[in-house]
Image: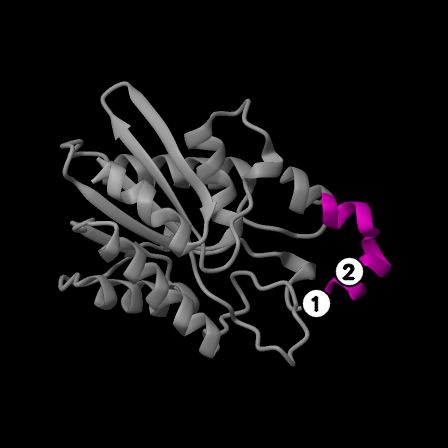
Amino acid sequence: MLLILARHGNTFGPDDTPVWVGANEDLPLVETGLGQSRAIGRAIRDGGITLDRVIAGPLKRTRTGARLAAETCGFTTEVEIDDRLKEIDYGVWGGKPDSEIEESWGRDAIENWRERSIVPEGAGWSPSPGTLRENVKAVLASVTGDLSPDTAVLIVTSNGILRYFHERLAGEEAASGEAKVKTGHLCAVRIEPGRIDLLAWNRAPGDIIPILKDAA
């Protein structure tokens, strides 16, 4: 089967100050984010992929992104919502800009998460990394029941959750610095009995089309 993972599009416009957007910051997609969602769908369509399922986290940005991607690529079945794909609650960091977090926690704490996926102690993040790993394992189990070569599933979720998918799919020895997925970017994984091939990670829609064509 082919598993396609995507991060939702932008939730900030050019004049907005970006803040940490977690489970408690249920922001909608801005205009560029809506366009990124449609670009995800075009990439899947132009890559020759026919989706069997589309699954999204429950927040506005993932639900809307999944719906637009599905509509654009011709998927007509209902988008499934899975609470296990909800973004991490960033605790006291949630809703704050980097500058404010840096004042209280230091720049290293921010970079430890962004570059090494290290959760800051005492910041109140939840669920725990262990629970997030179990959630990802359970979601993967739910989508890999049919490993037929022509089965294809799209999951739309958030950056924090995708880091744990990367750990599971690329292996715990994979460099954590490679786990980040930019807004509106995609990943592709071929899953066969006893084998996982990471075909692409953090690719722009236009860049992933030839990879999807090869996988179709």
How far is the residue under mark 1 from the one under mark 2? 7 Å
Question: Which residues are the magenta region?
Answer: 97-111
Q: Could you say which is closer to the camera, residue 84 or residue 69?
A: 69
Is residue 205 shown left or right of residue 26? left
Which residue sits furthest top? 194
Q: Is residue 72 left or right of residue 88?
A: left
Is residue 103 placed above or below 115 in the rendered structure? below
From the top left corner, tell me how far across and down residue 43 is, in percent.
31, 56
Between discs 1 and 2, the one toward the N terminus: 1
Secondary structure at badge 2 equals: helix
Q: Amino acid at mark 2?
A: Ile
The answer to whether any part of residue 142 appears in the image is no
Q: Which residue in the structure is indicated by mark 2?
A: 101
- Quarter of the rendering containing residue 211: top left
Q: Residue at x 41, y 39 (%)?
A: 200
Residue bearing the label numbered 1: 96
Residue 122 percent coordinates (x, y): 73, 47
Q: Secondary structure at mark 1?
A: loop
Quarter of the image for the C terminus: give it. top left
Residue 112 in the figure: left or right of residue 215: right
Q: Is residue 13 magenta?
A: no
Q: Position of residue 41 (x, y in %)?
A: 29, 61
Q: Picture quarter containing residue 22?
A: bottom right
